Image: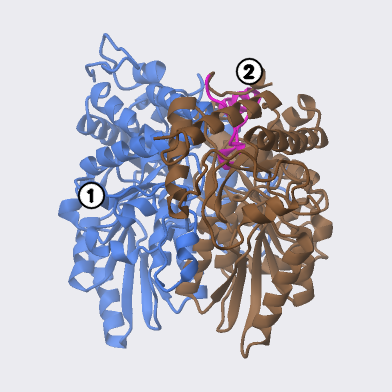
Amino acid sequence: MGVVGGMNDGTVCSDSPVSFGKQMRERYFLFEKNYINLNHGSFGAHPLPVRQELSRLQNEADANPDKFIRFTSPTYLDTCRRRVSEMLHSHCDEVVITLNATTAINTVLRNLYFQQGDHILMLSCVYGAVKKTAEYLAETTPVQLDEVDCTFPVADDEVISRFRAAVRRHSSRGTSIKVAIFDTIASMPGVRLPFERLIEECRAHGILSVVDGAHGIGCIPINLSQLRPDFFVSNCHKWLFVPRSSAVLYVPFRHQHLIRSSIPTSHSFVPRSTGFAGQRHIVNPMLLESGKSYFVSLFQYTGTVDSTPGLCIDVALRFRAQICGGEHAIQRYCCDLARRGEVLAAGILGTEGLAIAEKNRVGFANVRLPIDNALLSSPAYCTGDTEDHDTVANRINDFLHRAMMDEYNTYIPVIFQGGAFWARFSAQIYLDLDAFAYGAAALKELCIRVNSCGAVAVLGHTGEMAGSQQRRTTSVL
Amino acid sequence: MRDEHFLFSGSYVPLNHGSYGAFPAAVRTYQRSLQDQTESRSDAFIRFKAPSLLLESRTAIAGLLQVPRQTVVFVPNATTGVNTVLRNLSWADGDVIVYLSTAYGACEKTILHICETTPATSVRIDVSFPIEDDDLVDLFRLRAQGIAAQQGKRVKVAMFDTVCTFPGVRLPWEALVEACKAEGVLSLIDGAHGIGHIDLFDLGQVDPDFFTSNCYKWLFTPRPCAIFYVPTRHHHLIRTTYPTSHGFKPSQERQIPTAASSDSDYLGELFKWAATVDMSPYLSTLEALRFRSNVCGGEAAIENYCFDLAQQGGKRMAQLLETEVMDNRNAKLSQCCFAMVRLPLRFASDTVSTTDRVMDRRSEATRGGIEYNQQLLPPERGPEFVKTIMDKLRDEHDTWIPMKFYSGAIWFRISAQVYLEMADLEWAAGVLSKLCKELPGSASGS
């Protein structure tokens, strides 16, 4: 698939079109020669022109930190906010840049007040850190948690139906769902959710919708003026070719009064108590420009961080438009490759892809692994009679991840859900079917070892990886 | 040192290390190599290599502070450290947070937000510098006791700086921690200007309840990078990072270590991952320490140089400007890398200003000096003059010196560093002198 163009700003000049796949990888991406990156979904990746911009910005900051942090970076920030809000079809002042989706979700949830009877409703596929945030709130505020099962595969209508059932349940009990959190695209397995309909359900029932679009911008089209969620977050460092880490937090004007403080609280916070005499003496070294709304100024500076990743948004968008042929071309390639890659990988593994409606496919291929479930109770992998399957499965996944990296120089996240092991491949413009074939072959060999209990040789009596420095968390996605 | 090792643009005179720090080329090269490794094999680096590098960096910092590694973790910045403590604590009716008027703005705002959203209330102790160390400690104890004597009130936490942001003066934070212990108050030390600035080898002995310090300020690491110290006895109070992330365990799963189970790394596991960020600044700590040791001659050498330059340089600037440095009688405030010097502008005031108090103590300099304006300036124009001068420093002289209209005069803060020399401070004094003369309202100004 050829594309045209070069970036006409002098950063990169491409005289001839660069195809997606190996050519794009060679020309523009920064991976080590033999590393096959089949896990774009976890940490993203950024191309050379963006890396150059990042270095340029960091050099500028180091040459004169005060000037950069106080004066020039806010201007760059405004440009990037404007560009990203255009892409999301929102007003510029409804969007701010934060470090990552988790911070953005924490910011929203911690600014809300929860009373006795209030509930946060989540889908079971909720991202681990978001669930933990909710759990912490349940420990420290009156809020309680509720969950809608979303084990895949599950049809959209069924998800909506279960959501409605949860609403009815609370209604009949006299409790309230204050907030519903759901993804645009679930992390593991990687599947698009009927988030548009869920937003409508929330609106119909007076529930605040907090949409975790960590996998969102750059992965699927998002039109916030049509969707009208109550809160929306998305990582730019995942699918937008922006460096780690950077995310957008969208709060429509009607809800901005709810967001009193950033986390951590910083200079732009204005305390409510006007009677506080000392207030006028609080030094605000970050000049609060007149004309900026409270919401926007709140997030212009939230403690000293490295803001340069988010400031690369403009260059990343130009790369996608000029070198890659635009959002539609990128997203279509990724979906297409994911679909064909899934078929190919399933064929190699002798299994099948996750049964989802094609409209719910994004740049992910979810393939079942041929691991014998009987192993979950086998003494080869269990340390005790009553160990639950999830714990044992995690042990197997740990082995797969480590061995994949050490022996095959790749990483494909695996999760045990719905009674089977699912591997999630991420498609991207720097990949082609060969990469999927490679990944599938690696997994096939490793599964054979798992099934023949060959993995037991690397598992100590505690079930931990022998020689491992510390337990790795498989929930880091 | 500056030209050979640091990254500043040629014309820029870096007199404000205190705000955002700076780091040498060697550290940047190392950081970039970490970033290259991350892009080259992201999952390999982030999941499998970074955790052990993080442990190494924590070990190195723990060594510098002479505390167990289990008590020290990385956070992005001291503001996050302060937020982490204050937001983890449970607040009941009657709980009071006490802090000084010199608290860093964002930290004060954090306290005010806490007071808006929990039953906690706060008391701000107005302090005017210079003040003697003993007087400050006595002032705190008196106020704390006064609050505790009120029905239903207790001082739960007191927050202090090690070295204040403005004025840039060292606080008797060790004695304040001791006073907190005597009063049964938790001490939260905002050591934003701490590690790499003042000697913290006694941190374990001083034993504050919570301590946070920016490494990107005085330790030559990239931004953002700070440490967060919590002695084991308080680990049960810190349940979550901000933001909450994978390390959080719900109460039924949480295993808080007692002192006996010393191989547990509860805090480390909690703070190992606090959402996706570029961890290369944390991981560059070792390289920063190596530079300070190998190229600069070690922490003591750096501290000696910087303190000396600040103290001698401050005096020299005061001499050139015919004003004075801010210090207390025992010369304790200046035991840091900042020099606080007054601009030669006399403002009208009917209260005893800092200027007068300091001038009363001056023994050598000409009393009354040659100020640049014969008539007294109206104090309400102080902030405007500050802005005018600072803008000109930036636009016409390619430097930045924080200053403030404080206690009836304009005081500025110079950050001494290994890449500066006396000549730089003398140059700055010349520029400031010129800018004062140019001010509208001064004798030779329009």
> Tag 1: residue type?
Ala
Q: Tell me the chain of label 1.
A: A
Q: Say few, some or many: other residues with alpha carbon within 10 Å of mark 1 (under 14 / 14 to 19 / 20 or more).
A: few
The residue drawn where x is 49% and y is 60% is A281
Q: Tell me, by letter, which chain the rendering colours blue.
A: A
As drawn, is A470 to the left or to the right of A130? right
Instruction: Using the image, tell me which numbered label, if any, was put on residue B3.
Output: 2
Magenta-tinted stretch = B11-33
Where disc 2 sits, the SS reads helix
Indicate which disc residue A297 carries. Answer: none
Is A255 on the left-hand or right-hand side of A108?
Answer: left
Q: Is residue B381 magenta?
A: no
Determine the residue positioned at 28% across, 67% down: A208
- Chain B in the picture: what colour? brown
Please, which colouring scheme is shown? by chain
- Compared with B367, A38 (above or below) is above
Is residue A142 in sight in this rendering?
yes
- Image coordinates for residue A50, horizontal then vertical, percent: 39, 26
Q: Is residue A448 visible?
A: no
Q: Which residue is mark 1?
A: A357
Q: Nearer the viewer, residue B396 or B148?
A: B396
